[in-house]
Structures are given as structure tokens and as C-alpha cells.
């Protein structure tokens, strides 16, 4: 930030013109304006109608300055011809040093380019006069609803999902409240655009479509400077950080720095679905390189062009990051780990869960939303969780996270030891069924699932041997639930529960149409990516989407409103139960085990209330006293995209 004082401003001029020229200029404020600047303490200040004289005398005073040449007969010529280049923008000034400085004026042209306050054609006549917008907009005044209708119409004109994604991101950077109103009111249509599955393609092509940075990029080059980088972010009261290192983006693998699309998308959902203020959200990418040769050879790649760092170098960078976040934002900032590879995801969660407010959506969020679906499915298939057998294809962070939460819920319901309830859950990885004879060669997070059983190498053989009632896919490998797999499940289950959770759509273990057709319409099916309704034998089957977006926005809101300082597994169970409670008989009649996204903000408020209540119960809440009605309190804390009136 450049201070406006007599030595740096008057003597050196506005932006690099010569001292002689700057002294000949008459600087004036031609009208009162609202001005915002940061003072020496980093605090925002606002003043009306300040003068240049006071700005020169007071180092930190905000000021709006214009060059007034109205008393001159002709413009002054400079080298190269043309008019006087006050702002150093002509070729004649290319070799001169200039100082970039920031003055935020809450009026006129700059107001139309401030996404946090821009209202576009919705500015009223009075606002246009008060904020010097007259002539900068067409004369028509439209309301917020008509703006939403227009934007939705425009987005629907695009046939390619990535084009719709880019249109939505452009809107977010232009008019924040319009973006969120559009998303909230059309969430079922637009959720697949701003998040899975389209966000996966956006990350793959992020270097080509990258326009404006929407978060912080921290790389290996920044070691020792991370706290300083965090202070560069303009918003200071951050409540939620979503961070990735880009090594395991959805089912697409290592996308390096271009994984930034995931934190940006997740935080858009935190606001739209969970009501967390946009200014309180911070997307961060930790760039430690990539092992993706295609990325390294792509001329448009925006990250470090080196092989991915690991070991001590990686650990030291992450430790500095975690320490800096806590130092800069305090004890109660939620740090959500997103799309880290298995070997780092589990280690980071285990290392920091006792010292920071951390949450891994791939491990814990996925587990919570799947458990909610299973609790709901019991209304359709009967019995309790303890009465069922669960078989997973995939034993990574998602699979083992879901398995652990299922075992915890069964333990809670039956009072049986966790070691016993884990025996209800079986996992298959790339080498076959996880059994005790493989114990020595297993990664540490797989070892709890090594049960006594003879080795089984093939997935289909594991199904025939274990005879599960619930089949869960978290492998990231598409079309692995083959026709024979689904038919086998249907042969010994009247209503087989089949969850194909891998994202994006191309990586789904099977489609909704395949599941219903191969099971003769008997399957209870849900997936990670959305599928259209399926007609089979004259009946319409509507599949549920086990989307983490059901859980993490409300979960995060619950942590925020309670001032939680740590995440406990019981909070995840509370979130699952709260989501399952939102499924009505009308939904069950359609075969759904999740409620529709149209009521997601109501759902998030109930989840937030249950999570907050658990935080208070466990003594982990710091916002005291506890509100009497947590649901109403959660709803009152949620961000509204409604336009504010300006004066």
C-alpha cells in the first residue's frame, strides 16, 4: 500500500510523470465521493468529500484525486505526441518506474466493477444519482428476479457444460449476489455445472480458461513466507478455508496447481447451500509440483513445472501453512482438506485434528452423506444397520472413511465394541479382498479391515463369498459394477442397495439405467454424480445423489455458529442422522434415499443445528450461551443474496 504523503505523492507525482510535470498539475476533488482505503493498522476507513490538502497532511487519510485540465487552453504535449500521460500508460513512459496504488471508491465506474456491491441494471434511480452511475448504465431499471431469469436463459443457450461453467464463473466475478441468487434458486440444474461433474473438466483445462485468481496460490517457492502471503488476502475475518494440493482431483488424478477449481467450487457451495458469507471463505491451493506429464508439458499450465515434492520437504511446507493459518485467523477457522492423495490425506487429518479445526471432506464428508443414505435405505429394505453386510470396491480415503463411520454408528446403536462392528464391513482393493493374511503388506488405514477369511482375488468372487446386502463403489474406476455384478447382487437380495459413488460421471461404477435394468427395477440406487430418471417396465425410477454437498455446507455452518474448536466423530454421526431425518415418505415412494436439493438450505440449517448441539454437548463450543432454538439461529446466520439498498 502506498501512503499519500508529501514526500511520496507530491514530490514524485501520481504515477511516474516527471517532477516538473506533476508540480504543474492542479489536483482537485470535483465532487464528494465515498472513499475506502486501508490505514496503517490495516483497517478499512471511509470518508466523504475529503480534500487533497488534508490527504497531503495526513499520511493515512483516504482521498479521491482527479487531474483537472479544464483551465488549460490546449493539452500539454509530451514526448511521442498526444496528451499528457498522467497515469504512465503511453509508450513514451514504458521505461519509467511507477508505483501501483489502490483507492477504492464506492461510486461510479468502479462500483460497477466491484462484484461484492455491483447490482447491474438493478440500481435504482436514486442510487444512480447518489453514486454517480447516471449515464454509465442504460436507462432501464430491472429487479433482481428478472436478472436471474435473464441469466438462466443465457446459460441455457450453451450446449457444452464447460461453457456454462465459465459463464457462471464470469457472473460470480461480476455480480456476486446475482450469482448466488441464481444458484440457490436453480440448485438442481446448476449444481452439476459449478461442481461435479463439470468442475472436473474445468480443472483439467484450468490453465486455458484461467482469467482472474479466485483464491491464494502457495507454492514451494513461498516457504518461509506463508504468513505474509495469507496477509495479502484482502478479507481478514476468514471462517472457512478449503485447501488442496491437487494430487487426487475427483477421479482424474494429479492435476497439480489446476486443482484450484475444487476449493473455489466447494466454497461457492458453502455460501449457496450453507449460508456462509462469501467474504468469510478462502480457497487455497498448495503447489508442490505435479507428476502429471501432460500438465508439465502443457504450455498453458499455471503451476510449478517440477515433479511433486514429498517427504520432509512436503511436511515442512504443510506444517508452516497450518501454523500460519492458525496464527493469522485464530483457533476457530475451519480448514477443510480437499482431494489430497491417500498417503497425505490420512496423515494430515491425524496429525492436525487435535491441534486445529480440520475436516477432510473425502474421508469424513463422504462417509457422513453415505451413512445418511444407508440410514434412509433401511426404511425401504428393513432391518437395522447391524443386520446388513457391506462390501466396498475401493479402500482409499473415501472407502475406509465410510466404512469407519458405518462401524461407529453400529457401535453406537448396539453398544458393541468398534472392533466387532467393523467385521460387518468388508473391503476390496486392487489386490482383492482385504484379509488378515495380507496384514503385513497393507497400508495403515486398511489394516482395521483385514478380517479372518481366505484370500479372494476377484471382485465378483468376493460378492459371491461375502453375499453383501449393500454394495458400495469408491474405487474411482468406471464401469466396474458390471451386469454380472448387479445380477449377482440381485440374486440373493430382494432390494439390493447399490451405491456407485465415484466422480465424475465417467468414473461412476455403473449408471442408474444399468443398475435398474440389470436388477429388474429392484435396486435401491444412488450415485456420486447425477443421473436422469430411468423408466423401467412402465415405472419411473429417480435415483438419489450421494453428494457431499448435502453435508459439508451445513456441517461447516454448525461449527461456525457454535464456535467449535475441534471436529469430533460424533458430530459426523449427528450430521448423518439429521440428513436422514429430512427424507419423507413421499421421497421413499419414489425410491429416493436422499431429499431433493431444492430444499438444501433448510436441510443445511437442520444439519448445522444438530452439529452445533453436539459441539455444545461435548464441550467443544466457544460461543456461549447456547441459543435456545439452534435451527432458527442457524437460519438467521445464513447469508442472503438479496440486494442491499445503497444510500
Image (cartoon, helix red, strand yellow):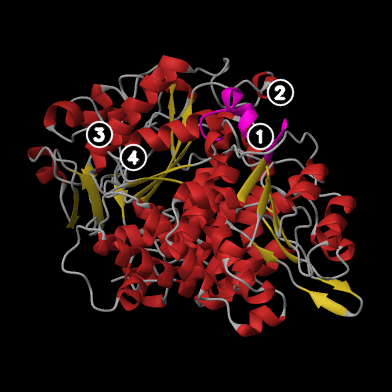
At horizontal 60% and vertical 40% (from top left) the residue drawn is: 451
Q: Tag 1 or tag 2, which sits nearer the N-term?
A: 1
Disc ID at residue 233: 4
Dot 2 and dot 3 residues touching (CB under 8 Å): no
What residue is pinned by disc 2?
294
Q: Is residue 395 above or below residue 229?
A: below
Circles 4, 1 touching at the beta carbon (< 8 Å): no
State yes or no: residue 453 in magenta: no
Residue on which the image places disc 1: 208
* Residue 402 to residue 206: above or below: below
Spatial CA span between label 4 and label 1: 24 Å
Earlier in the chain: of badge 4 and badge 1, it is: 1
Residue lying furthest bottom: 586
Image depth: mark 3 or mark 1 in front: 1
Q: Which residues are magenta?
A: 428-446
Q: Position of residue 632 (x, y in %)?
A: 33, 78
N-term mark: 2 or 4: 4
The front one of 609 and 172 is 609
Residue tagged 3 = 1
Amino acid at each position: 500500500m502506498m501512503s499519500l504523503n508529501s514526500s511520496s505523492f507530491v514530490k514524485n507525482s501520481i504515477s511516474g510523470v516527471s517532477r516538473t510535470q506533476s508540480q504543474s498539475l492542479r489536483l482537485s476533488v470535483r465532487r464528494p465521493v465515498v472513499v475506502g482505503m486501508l490505514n496503517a493498522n490495516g483497517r478499512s476507513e471511509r470518508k466523504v468529500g475529503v480534500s487533497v490538502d488534508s490527504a497531503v497532511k495526513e499520511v493515512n487519510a483516504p482521498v479521491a484525486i482527479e487531474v483537472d485540465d479544464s483551465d488549460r487552453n490546449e493539452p500539454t504535449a509530451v514526448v511521442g505526441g498526444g496528451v499528457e500521460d498522467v497515469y504512465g500508460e503511453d509508450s513514451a513512459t514504458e521505461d519509467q518506474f511507477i508505483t501501483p496504488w489502490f483507492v477504492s471508491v464506492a461510486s461510479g465506474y468502479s462500483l460497477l466493477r466491484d462484484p461484492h456491491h455491483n447490482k447491474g441494471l438493478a440500481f435504482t434511480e436514486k442510487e444512480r444519482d447518489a453514486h454517480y452511475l447516471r449515464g454509465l448504465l442504460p436507462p432501464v431499471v430491472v429487479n433482481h428476479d428478472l436478472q436471474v431469469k435473464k441469466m438462466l436463459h443465457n446459460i441455457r443457450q450453451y450446449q457444452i457444460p464447460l461453457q456454462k461453467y465459465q459463464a457462471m464463473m464470469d457472473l460470480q466475478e461480476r455480480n456476486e449476489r446475482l450469482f448466488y441468487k441464481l444458484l440457490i434458486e436453480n440448485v438442481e440444474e446448476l449444481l452439476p455445472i459449478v461442481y461435479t461433474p463439470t468442475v472436473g473438466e474445468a480443472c483439467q483445462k484450468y490453465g486455458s480458461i484461467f482469467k482472474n485468481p479466485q483464491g491464494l496460490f502457495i507454492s514451494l517457492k513461498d516457504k518461509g513466507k506463508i504468513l505474509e502471503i495469507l496477509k495479502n488476502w484482502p478479507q481478514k475475518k476468514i471462517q472457512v478455508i478449503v485447501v488442496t494440493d491437487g494430487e487426487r482431483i475427483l477421479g482424474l488424478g494429479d492435476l497439480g496447481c489446476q486443482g484450484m477449481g475444487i476449493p473455489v467450487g466447494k466454497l461457492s457451495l458453502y455460501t449457496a447451500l450453507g449460508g456462509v458469507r462469501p467474504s468469510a471463505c478462502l480457497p487455497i491451493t498448495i503447489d508442490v509440483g505435479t507428476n502429471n506429464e501432460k500438465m508439465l508439458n502443457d504450455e498453458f499450465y499455471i503451476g510449478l513445472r517440477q515433479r511433486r515434492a514429498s517427504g520432509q520437504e512436503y511436511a515442512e511446507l504443510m506444517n508452516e501453512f497450518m501454523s500460519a493459518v492458525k496464527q493469522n485467523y485464530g483457533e476457530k477457522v475451519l480448514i477443510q482438506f480437499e482431494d489430497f492423495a491417500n498417503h497425505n490425506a490420512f496423515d494430515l487429518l491425524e496429525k492436525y485434528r487435535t491441534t486445529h479445526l480440520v475436516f477432510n471432506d473425502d474421508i469424513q464428508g463422504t462417509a457422513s452423506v453415505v451413512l445418511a443414505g444407508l440410514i434412509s435405505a433401511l426404511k425401504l429394505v428393513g432391518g437395522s444397520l447391524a443386520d446388513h453386510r457391506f462390501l466396498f470396491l475401493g479402500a482409499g480415503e473415501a472407502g475406509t472413511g465410510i466404512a469407519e463411520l458405518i462401524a461407529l454408528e453400529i457401535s453406537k446403536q448396539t453398544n458393541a465394541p468398534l472392533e466387532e462392528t467393523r467385521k460387518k464391513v468388508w473391503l476390496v482393493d486392487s489386490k482383492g479382498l482385504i484379509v488378515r493374511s495380507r496384514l503385513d503388506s497393507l497400508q495403515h488405514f486398511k489394516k482395521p479391515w483385514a478380517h479372518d477369511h481366505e484370500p479372494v482375488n476377484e471382485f465378483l468372487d468376493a460378492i459371491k463369498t461375502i453375499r453383501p446386502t449393500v454394495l458400495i463403489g469408491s474405487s474411482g474406476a468406471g464401469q466396474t459394477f458390471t451386469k454380472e455384478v448387479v445380477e449377482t447382487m440381485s440374486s440373493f437380495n430382494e432390494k439390493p442397495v447399490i451405491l456407485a459413488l465415484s466422480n465424475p460421471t465417467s468414473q461412476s461404477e455403473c449408471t442408474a439405467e444399468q443398475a435398474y435394468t440389470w436388477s429388474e427395477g429392484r435396486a435401491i440406487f444412488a450415485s456420486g454424480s447425477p443421473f436422469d430418471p430411468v423408466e423401467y417396465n412402465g415405472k419411473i425410477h429417480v435415483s438419489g445423489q450421494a453428494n457431499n454437498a448435502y453435508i459439508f455446507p451445513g456441517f461447516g455452518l454448525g461449527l461456525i455458529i457454535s464456535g467449535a474448536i475441534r471436529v469430533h466423530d460424533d458430530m459426523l454421526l449427528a450430521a448423518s442422522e439429521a440428513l436422514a431425518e429430512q427424507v419423507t415418505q413421499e421421497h421413499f415412494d419414489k425410491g429416493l434415499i436422499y431429499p431433493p436439493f431444492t430444499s438444501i438450505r433448510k436441510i443445511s440449517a437442520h444439519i448445522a443445528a444438530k452439529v452445533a448441539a453436539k459441539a455444545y454437548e461435548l464441550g467443544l463450543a466457544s460461543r456461549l450461551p447456547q441459543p435456545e432454538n439452534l435451527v432458527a439461529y442457524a437460519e438467521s446466520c445464513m447469508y442472503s443474496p438479496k440486494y442491499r439498498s445503497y444510500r
